[in-house]
Image (tube, rainbow, N blue to C red):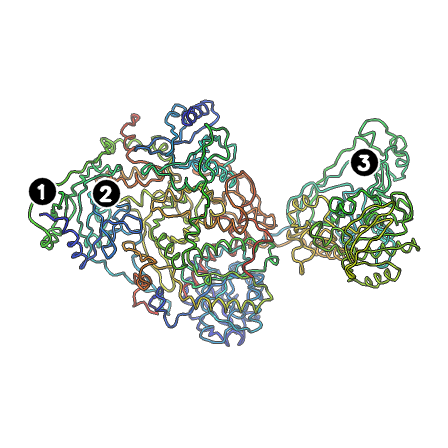
Amino acid sequence: MLLSKQNLMPLLNSLASDVDVFVPTTIDGVKKFARLADGVEPDFDMINTTMPPKDLLFPQTQKMYHFDVDKNGSYHIHEYDESREQIVFGIRPCDMRSIVCLDEVFLTKGFVDEFYANAREKLLTVSIGCTQAAETCFCTSMGVDPIYAPNADVMLQDTGDAYKVTAQTPKGEAAVSAWSEFLSDGDAEPVNCDVTLKVSMEGVVDKLEGMYDSPIWENLSIKCLNCGTCTYVCPTCHCFDISQENRKKDGVRFRCWDSCMFSEYTAMAGGHNPRPEKLERERNRFMHKLNFFERRYGMSLCVGCGRCVEKCPVALDITRLIDDIGSYEVAPASAE
Amino acid sequence: MSAQEIIRARAKELLESGEIATFIGWEAGRFTNQTTPLVITDAADAGKLVFNEYCANTLAKYVTDVLARGKVGLVVRGCDSRAIVRLINDKVIKREDVYLVGVGCPGMKDRKTDEPLKKCTECRHNNPLVFDEMAGENAEKAVPEDRFAEVKEVEAMTAAERTRYFESIYAKCIRCYACRDVCPCCTCRECFVDQRRENWVGKQNNVAENRFYGLTRVMHIGDRCIECGECERVCPMDLPLMKLNRKVIQDMNDLFGEFESGLVISAEPSVLTTYELTDREEFM
Amino acid sequence: MSRIGVFLCYCGSNIAGTVDVEAVAEMARTLPGVVYVETNKYTCSDPGQEGVKNAIIEKGIDRVVVGPCSPRMHEPTWRKLLADTPVNPYMLEVANLREQCSWVHKDKAIATEKAKDLVKMAVAKVARLSPLHSTEIPVHKKALVIGGGIAGMQTALDIADAGFKVTIVERETSLGGKMVMLDKTFPTMDCSACICTPKMSEVGNHPNITVKSYSEVESVSGYIGNFEVTIREKAKYIDYTKCTGCGACETKCPSKVINEFEQGMSKRTAIYKMFPQAVPSKPVIDAEHCRMLQEGKCGVCAKVCPTGAINYQDEDKLTTETYGAIVFATGYKLIDWKPLYPEYGGGKYPDVITGLQFERLVNASGPTEGHILRPSDNKEPKSVVIIKCVGSRDPNKGKAYCSRACCMYSAKHAHQYLDKVPDGRCYVFYMDVRTPGKGYDEFYMNTVHDGAQYLRGRVSKIYKEGDKLICKGEDTLTSQQVTVAADMVVLETAMVPADGIDELAAKFTVGRDADGWLVEAHAKLRPVETNTAGIYLAGTAQGPKDIPDSVCQAGAAASKVIGLLNKDKLESNPQISRVNEALCQGDGACANICPYGAISIVEKQFRENSRKVTRPVAQVNPGLCQGCGACTVTCRAGAMDLMGYTNESIMREVDALCQW
Amino acid sequence: MPVVENNANAIPEDWEPKIIAFCCHWCTYTGADLAGLNRMNYPANVRVLRIPCSGRMNPQYVIEALNKGCDGVLVCGCHPGDCHYVTGNYYARRRMMIFKRLLEYEGLEPGRFQVKWISGAEAGKFRDTVMKAVEDVRALGPINLTREIPYFELPAMPDDDEEAFNAVPEEVFPEEVNA
């Protein structure tokens, strides 16, 4: 099936009349996904958004419930309305891979996060394959195909004048069948996307096992500022904190993104901090990305989107770290 | 010899002689014209040091991280030297903790656009103010006429426009705290945002909490800001933070006399920790 | 979880008339942490207080909110009450339901709502307070008086008479200060020496007073009740235990030096007593001018001394003692008019003299033995011009303030001149004549009747014509130029703080005003206290004064000292600043801002991340801190917090209020 | 109570300005007590929070109060020169001048944050200051600092329709919450 580019906006507008459709765009100078509405211009040529799409499933601040006190001093808890049906249209394959990671965290191993599960269930993912890569893109090295996202409900691949439409899940099939008036039959070869930045993940995961005390971390972390930029622009970072805020007669229980780069992240009530300095925090971040997650879920927590490489204030570059790990010679483990 | 060659040679000598334990400069990054801060302890690594017109990062704040190893050598331009002065005046480091290799700064460029960085076009002191030696000559650079021009632009808006202007800024802030972490004036052992007992600022990301952070940040650093513009440069959301810093600086300038921080090493109290009996009276 | 007891008061109908106290109590029961709420007709009455105590015991209350009148009224009462219970007296918050609620609002519904908020705020705050304990500060029953002029002597005598030990530090070689240089004192015209020297010997002989002459304060540390002061006693080169003060040495000493006491109008020897009635009545050697000490030859004084008291090897002695209280009686000096008033000759005419020089000229033991003879040619001046406000009330050249005593002593000078030179003429140029004081105006009028001619206006120029000093000025009352040919001109110059007061004040962290005078704690209500607890002011150290006022203030300062030294121990205020050393960066902003010098930066060793580090941190001296909290705001990291008004408690109070 | 606080046209009828007054213990708090002793009358919209000295006044308290829904903030202390702690209000004067300008730069109406020196004897001035502050804030309407700007929306900008800008984007607390 093909979706001609001319039919793209009519399709989107038609979808937006029923459900919330999120598209990549630039709002107030920030490249991010936003709800299609008057004044919001979708930009499917944008290589990728600055802010990852994870906000759709895991908002920076998520209100969990709210409560109030009545005249008798009793507390009452109220839940929020359940979220609505949503479509994310134009999500890139790397970001689709990040949703795989998030699904693992929030839905598997016996832990199901209600808020995430609810939003995820109501989200239809329409991925558009890339036609060009930024200099910081290295998805291919992380096992992501820039023109194909296997877990998207619907995959759109650029063929020039039209997108090749593939429904990949039952949800996707249902959706595509409803779009039929905008689609035409046919097939075309997707345009390829050349990703120039390449790193080798060969042996990196295993090697890291023996590198906990390696000097590599010190050399790496020394230039880190310990800001949270990398974690907040990362599509897979998923740490959160739960807190509450009272205002007037009401209070809100919420959860919000947290960052393992902050010293407060691991600070304990008694004052002890097991990760007191940036060395420990940096090591944790990269071990989590490249080793811990791999061990637990069998996949890398880095999808190669390049956002952290792009946005890091001090150009601390995960691709260089991966190279460095690759060329690092692990000292032979001493006999037990 | 070019400044880069002198820097490499001096870093090597200083490390070899044991006069310093670490040297801070820049190295080339992965991408074209990209540089990134470099901290070396081994004289053999001196060859990695670079100095070109794309050295965007300031270096002074790294001194506090590596000081425990011994005396620190670093390259200083105008902004780095003012940051060093700031750290000394705030008693974070001592003058004898650092060996400063000064370098004249022609102003740095954005590696992607090749345009001068905004912070560099606004810079009033491009050459180092404090140094132990100079690597080459001072550089010429145009000094901006009115450093408060952008503040005046905002002031010219109506109150409602300003409310919305800053609301949109705070709406965009993701509270990554890069502006804090890069700032040579932000040297608290624990930032107020991390103080949960007082709970100054809540952890929700919304306009109100972000405003609390934004306003307090400015109140905390306003009387020390060296106007290096790093906060604005590192902001991943490109928020115009200097419009806030310079507002406070402009007002201090107007109210309490010519204000520019970090120019000289001095034990003088900052403008907001002193007073004059003759200060303007607006609250009768 | 805290167990808060809330005690609300009707105050008869004072509160209950406008506030539905029971409704407030109902609401208070719903607040988190509140375990007990009680209302009372008069909580402050004996049965009311008894009820509070009983409830605390029975309900296991650990913090208390009371809702009665203003805390300014009864907060001490509540604290005292809690001191008798297991509840710490500082686990208390007072909701001001009367002065700031029931008395200022009329609508009962509105006032009740407001009262609820005030109680909510108090509950929110009290839940965040922590117990505080005052510490006892011992009081060393000994006072130090700095300065041995009339104010210092009077203070010392009053304190000593009350039975406390006093040390006087005087940097000159004798007590007496400026007063002993004066000839007569207005308005009674009694001889200054006759009333001052008996005081000096009384001080010198008082069993409770130690006089350290020729001495200065070297350093000081500590706080109220416990000031450790090191005093430097300059080398006198004379063993006072042997010296009898016979004066033989003075008569033989070959070095002649300008006599400061006589205002430079005569000479003295290098071994000298300041003046004949000096106390201690023993000489010192002025090392700078002694041939033996400078060149190693002479030694005449040692030869003539019958007791062998001369010791050329003498050195400065440092002694350290602890004092409970300190009085600054450091006095004044006259402004150096010469560089400021070139139009008066700037010092090049010897017959333009200061008032103090005139005092010596007219004094029977002065250089002219009381005959008024002008310095240039020792002739009796037949025409004298007295110029007032030289340096005073002249913000352009000198000081903006009025030196207070000059109007009277210039009248005195005119009177004395006309008395001694009956055919002389005396002109007084003045800006105003200010004579508020007992018998002052009468004295001034008498001088006018004596024939002194008062001309309103400043002299703009003095120049020499022959042996006359031509004074040109304007009589602003007639708007006419006035020219007076005078034989001598007396400048009544401004009082300014004594030399060295800046350094001394800094050592004690006593504040100085823009003109350098020491600053009292409150201009009206605490005129003899300084902002540093335990340090007091007497005499002109605080500002220009005449003798009666100086003596008066000296007595006041002494009474404050006596009140303090009478106590064995002081209770410290525990609501003071506290440093969280983990957060403190040691940048010293707090120390800069502290008006009491209570904060110092000290190097301390810590274990951080399993490393030993030495770093500077702030330290609060609990004896000096008064609990203003200014330091807390300068500390960006919040390392400095004010006990009883912590950041946390104020933030929660704000939050509680916002929930209305 | 439905929270409709952003739309100037929809001020709830029972809305009353709430103002917090930070008063120093030695002067203004005493002045406020004196107003009580003299049985002066002033609006109940002001609640006094006692601090030892205006030098203790941390700007962060002001932001907290405004953020948490106070419609106005008053900071009052001794007249310069009369500070019980000698210098506290001199520092406060500098800090508050800078801070007030900063808040107004960000668009806060000047009436919402006022600083006044009120001595222990000036009960009348305390009353007048409170009355004026309440009047000012009443004219300004409910404060609007906690407006939520939804992440996924195009924020209303100055040139947009006023009504759209002022509309409440999200009902933070639904209707059923009892008043």
Foreground of the two, A292 or C658: C658
Graded by Cα atoms within 10 Å as few (under 14), some (14 to 19) or many (20 or more), the crowding at tag 2 reads: some
Q: Is residue D26 visible?
A: yes
Residue A144 falls in which quadrant of the image? top left
Separation (CA) of disc 1 from disc 3: 112 Å
Q: Position of residue C360 (x, y in %)?
A: 86, 47
C394 with respect to D135 (left or right)? right
Secondary structure found at label 3:
loop
**Dot 3 amino acid type:** Asp
Residue in view at x 37 percent, y 72 percent: D13
Q: Locate the C terminus of chain A and report the quarter of the image it occupies.
A: top left
Residue with the mark numbered 2: A47
Q: Position of residue D60 (x, y in %)?
A: 46, 54
Name above or below for residue B161 compared with residue C52: above
Residue with the mark numbered 3: C286
Foreground of the two, C511 or C575: C511
